């Protein structure tokens, strides 16, 4: 199941990455790095995400997903960030709290909204959290939201 999810996420990433490609490399860099590109008015409270994901532990590690750090950044999220920003952060860098928060903020406030808009899906706090926790396929394919993700949303709303 995890391999299938990772494969699907990789394919979604490639589809969206290629659909965002521009002929001029300079304009591509400017547009993809500019958070206003997403025109995201929905703000995610990163303190709540950190509390849920790692209880504030910058050295947190999930053996199943290989997620690391305060915001539990996964390898695919790290790969996307590196590609979009032309940097080479490593998995070990995710244990640096500032780097981890920077990547999570970009993913939550720029990248996920870009993907949602690409699929003509409303950019809401709930949709962003579903994508962050379960993956965009649950929204795009109208799959039943996992119980774990429902609990995650409830925790976010309570904090």
Image (cartoon, rainbow, N blue to C red):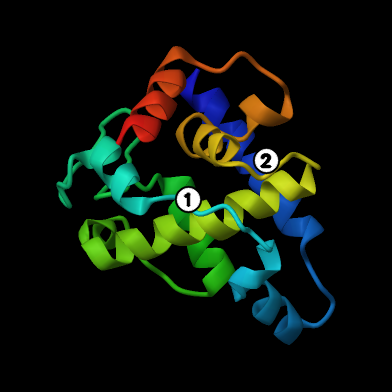
Q: Is residue 142 above or below residue 45?
A: above
The residue to which callout 1 is attached is: 77
* Direction from residue 82 to residue 41 in the image, left or right: right
Badge 2 marks a residue whose secondary structure is helix
Labels 2 & 1 near each other (Cβ < 8 A): no
Relative to residue 119, is residue 135 depicted above or below?
above
Image quadrant containing the C terminus = top left
Q: Say whether residue 119 is left or right of residue 116.
A: right
Question: Compared with residue 137, is residue 114 higher up or lower down, i.e. above or below?
Answer: below
Locate residue 5: give its quadrant.
top right
Q: Is residue 70 above or below residue 147?
A: below
Q: Residue at x 38, y 20 (%)?
A: 151
Rendered residue at 67%/40% (across/down): 11
Q: Which residue is rendered at x = 53% and y = 57% of the image? A: 109
> Is 21 positioned to the left or the right of 60 in the image?
right
- CA separation in Å, label 2 and label 1: 13 Å
As drawn, which residue projects farthest toward the right? 23
Q: Give the residue furthest to the front.
A: 158
Pick the residue in front: 35 or 134. Answer: 35
Is 148 left or right of 142, judged from the image as shown?
left
- Element type at marker 1? helix
Total number of numbered discs in the rendering: 2
Return the x and y of residue 135 as percentages of the image width and height: 55, 33
* Image coords of residue 43 (percent x, y): 50, 54
Q: Residues within 10 Å of mark 2 (few under 14, many from 20)?
A: few
Mark found first going from the N terminus, 2 or 1: 2
The residue labelled by disc 2 is 11
């Amino acid at each position: 199941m995890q391999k299938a999810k990772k494969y699907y996420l990789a394919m979604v990433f490639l589809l969206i990455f290629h659909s965002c490609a521009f002929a001029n490399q300079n304009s591509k860099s400017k547009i993809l790095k500019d958070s206003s590109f997403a025109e995201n008015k929905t703000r995610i409270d990163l303190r709540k995400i950190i509390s849920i994901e790692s209880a504030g532990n910058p050295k947190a590690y999930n053996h199943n997903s290989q997620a690391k750090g305060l915001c539990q950044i996964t390898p695919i999220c790290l790969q996307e960030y590196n590609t979009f920003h032309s940097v080479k952060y490593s998995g070990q860098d995710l244990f640096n709290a500032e780097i981890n928060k920077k990547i999570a903020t970009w993913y939550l406030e720029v990248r996920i909204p870009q993907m949602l808009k690409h699929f003509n899906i409303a950019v809401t706090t709930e949709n962003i959290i579903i994508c962050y926790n379960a993956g965009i396929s649950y929204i795009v394919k109208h799959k039943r939201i996992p119980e774990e993700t429902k609990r995650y949303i409830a925790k976010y709303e309570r904090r």
